[in-house]
Amino acid sequence: MPLSAASAPLPVLILGGTTEASGLCRLLEHEAIFAPTLSLAGVTKNPHLPNIAVRIGGFGGVEGLKNWLRQHAVQAVIDATHPFAATMSQHAAKACADLELPLLRLERRAWLPTAEDQWHSVPSLTAAASLLADPAGYGQRPLRVFLTTGRKEVAPFCAAPQHTYLLRSIDAPDPTSLPPHTTCLSARGPFDYAAELAAMQAHHIDILVTKNSGGTATFPKLEAARTLHCPVIMVERPPHPAYPRVDTPEEAMAWLQTHQTASTLRDV
């Protein structure tokens, strides 16, 4: 059955903060059959906002999210948060299960190493810092470390103060959380290969520490590390609740259209 233009727009909540969320919002700007709201945590200052309704800030846990979903008569939720925003994903899964709302995870695929890469996979930033502090490993001598893990989770690396750190983040970090020998670089992706290679060479980087965020916007740093034979400490993604998942905004839009059609049929 074709989508009914006469039907009321379907209220949809998008939990955003990623490139994929932005892509989905751009698609939804031109779809009158939906009434989308993008929710952002408010971590990044001056975010790029789409031409749809936007709310910024937390919900107040699972119950706060459930109340908001009820108040706004939301009929479908898309969790397009960052792969490392595990708490929000868990809250969304619980709230949608309690309210029997359809929930979709929009998440880009994780990066995978090639035979030319020197990756050391770890489960957390604390584990990454421990690897740098290990006197039997990377803690044997001072290294120049490129940190691309975000500004809010730098404190664990104070456990390895012998190294020199180059920290890149969109917004400035809290200076009290930084290891003693840290240079901060404020920049927003995407980054290209030539620029990443030049930056790592200019700062004489010995090792790269990053999260397995996936996607293309920050992948060139891994290509630069490969070229320079630079080891990478890769923080792997935390587990997420098991619910339907797609990789692209277009697939998420198709899922929404399916649910809009189902909602129209229920109203007939």
Image: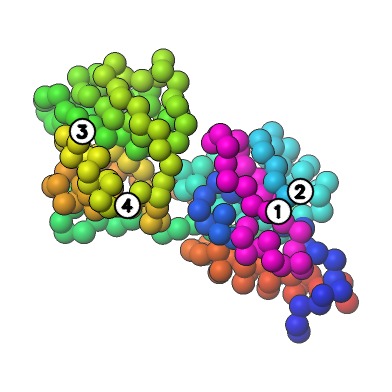
Q: Amino acid at mark 3?
A: His
Left or right for 202, reference 150? left
Q: Nearer the viewer, mark 1 or mark 4?
A: 4
Left or right for 55, reference 83? right
At a point 75% along the width and 82% down the height, the residue shown is: 2
- Kindly report the secondary structure that dominates the magenta region of the rendered protein: loop
Q: Which mark is residue 203?
A: 3
Q: Is residue 144 above or below residue 253?
A: above
- Closer to the chain start, of discs 3 and 2, is 2
Q: Is residue 25 above or below residue 230?
A: below
At a point 51% along the width and 64% down the height, the residue shown is: 248
Is there a contact, CB below 8 Å, between mark 1 and mark 4?
A: no
Is there a contact, CB below 8 Å, between mark 3 and mark 1?
A: no
Spatial CA span between label 3 and label 1: 41 Å
- Closer to the chain start, of discs 3 and 1, is 1
Which quarter shows the C terminus?
bottom right
Which residue, given by chain and number where applicable, does mark 4 sit on?
Answer: 192
**SS category of the residue bearing label 2:** helix
Spatial CA span between label 4 and label 3: 17 Å
Which residue, given by chain and number where applicable, does mark 2 sit on?
Answer: 69
Spatial CA span between label 1 and label 4: 30 Å
Q: Quadrant of residue 251?
A: bottom right
Magenta span contains residue 44: yes
Q: Amino acid at mark 2?
A: Leu
Magenta span contains residue 110: no
Left or right for 239, reference 63? left
Q: Which mark is residue 52?
A: 1
